Image (tube, coloured by chain):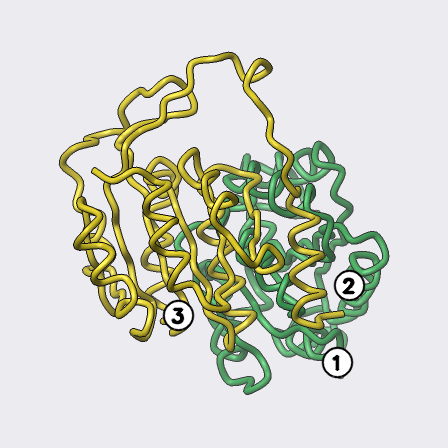
């Protein structure tokens, strides 16, 4: 397993101008590494629906590279999205999955069949152009640059170390961050969309 | 046009309304009575059709498209709309963007008793979400679709168009 922070540290060196959409407990680390905040989007709002929103962005902005950092608990809520994405074949879409095998934000309960699901296999068989699985940082770091040069939709499953939260939500530390509306406003301004 | 023709809702009417209102994408799960509409939409070079696996996706994809400056429409059946509750809440209503959702009103009739629970719960569902709606049953009602688009643009909220002619208008 890899720490989510290390995934983002490595990814950032290959990001270029990609629009990046992080989600889930692991995704919160992205803000520590991003150097182009105006191209970062927060699309959460209904668990399992960020994947579909990211597809909409890829289809709506076909000239932009769109990178989603999904979570396996969210993906399991709407697995049919793999077929929806494959059906449209967005060449600019890169679907990373940070798989910590549990619902970290609710105390670490395992997702169904947590250790035995081949998410990359599902994506490949659904019709993604390519799919990869990683569970060590060295291999991921060696390949991620080339993967981002492939035509999408590409799926990249990564086993990450769970960061379980047990504090009641009201007592958890809140770090300053832009909300969804602010990230949308900033991206649209960056891209010159009225 | 005869009275009988005017009483029928033609699929062309929907497509014309979509074009008039600048629609770029229709995100849909076709239902059994709308196949001709689907085929007609596929023939339009200005329109991109996005088939989905579950109705809740349609509202999230619509949000993403709207971020990119596109004009999406969700085209689903009332049963799927009910499945989409959390997506409608979290992705459409909370985001505050203009969205017309065209909803097949399965089971609805103005003649006699409604026996299909899908129809019985459709309007209470929309009312619970504070989503305004317009019933479209015939070609003469077609202009209500433009009314829905205008309302969505002004309020930056979802507005529903209920297609109440499910059993006749879209069939060949």
Q: Chain of mark 3?
A: A
The answer to whether A167 appears left or right of B12 in the picture is: left
Q: Secondary structure at mark 1?
A: loop
User: According to the colouring, which chain is yellow?
Assistant: A
Gap in Å between the C-alphas at discs 3 and 2? 26 Å
Chain B, chosen colour in render: green
Q: CA distance from mark 3 to mark 1?
A: 41 Å
Q: Residues within 10 Å of mark 2 (few under 14, many from 20)?
A: many
**Sequence order check, earlier mark of 2 and 1:** 1
Q: Quadrant of residue B63?
A: bottom right
> Looking at the picture, how far across and down is residue B67, in whole percent?
64, 61
For the residue labelled by badge 3, is the local secondary structure a helix, a strand or a loop?
helix
Q: Is residue B12 above or below residue A134?
A: below
Is residue A121 visible in the rendered image? The answer is no
Which residue matches tag 3?
A: A88
Between residues A173 and A96, which one lies in front from this camera angle?
Answer: A173
Q: Chain of mark 2?
A: B
Q: Nearer the viewer, residue A73 or B154?
A: A73
Asked if badges 3 and 1 are on one and the same chain, I answer: no
Asked if A154 appears above or below A134 in the picture, the reply is below
**Which residue corresponds to the image point at 29% horizontal and 74% vertical from the top-left?**
A150
Residue bearing mark 1: B2
The percent position of residue B38, horizontal first and vertical second, equals: 49, 72
């Amino acid at each position: 397993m890899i720490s989510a922070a290390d995934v983002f540290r490595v990814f950032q060196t290959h990001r270029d101008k990609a629009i990046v959409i992080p989600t889930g407990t692991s995704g919160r680390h992205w803000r520590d590494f991003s150097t182009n905040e105006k191209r970062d989007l927060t699309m959460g709002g209904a668990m399992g629906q960020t994947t579909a929103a990211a597809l909409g962005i890829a289809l709506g902005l076909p000239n932009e590279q769109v990178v989603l950092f999904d979570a396996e608990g969210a993906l399991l809520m709407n697995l049919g999205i793999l077929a929806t994405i494959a059906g449209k074949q967005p060449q600019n879409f890169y679907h990373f999955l940070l798989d910590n095998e549990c619902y970290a934000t609710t105390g670490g309960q395992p997702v169904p069949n947590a250790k035995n699901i081949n998410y990359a296999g599902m994506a490949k068989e659904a019709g993604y152009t390519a799919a990869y699985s990683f569970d060590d940082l060295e291999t991921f770091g060696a390949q991620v640059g080339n993967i981002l040069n492939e035509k999408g939709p590409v799926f990249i499953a990564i086993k990450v170390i769970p960061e379980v939260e047990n504090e009641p939500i009201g007592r958890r530390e809140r770090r300053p961050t832009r909300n969804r509306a602010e990230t949308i406003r900033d991206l649209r301004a960056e891209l010159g969309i009225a | 046009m005869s009275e009988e023709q005017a009483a029928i809702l033609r699929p062309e009417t929907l497509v014309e309304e979509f074009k008039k209102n600048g629609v770029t994408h229709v995100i849909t799960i076709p239902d059994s009575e709308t196949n001709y509409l689907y085929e007609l939409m596929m023939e339009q070079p200005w329109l991109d059709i996005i088939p989905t696996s579950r109705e809740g996706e349609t509202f999230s994809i619509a949000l993403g498209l709207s971020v990119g400056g596109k004009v999406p429409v969700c085209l689903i059946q009332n049963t799927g709309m009910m499945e989409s509750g959390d997506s409608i809440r979290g992705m459409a209503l909370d985001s505050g963007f203009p969205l017309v959702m065209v909803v097949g009103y399965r089971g609805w009739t103005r003649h006699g008793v409604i026996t299909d629970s899908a129809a019985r719960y459709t309007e209470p569902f929309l009312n619970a979400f504070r989503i305004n709606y317009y019933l479209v049953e015939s070609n003469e009602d077609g202009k209500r679709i433009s009314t829905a688009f205008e309302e969505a643009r002004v309020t930056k909220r979802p507005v529903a168009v209920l297609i109440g002619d499910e059993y006749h208008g879209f069939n060949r």
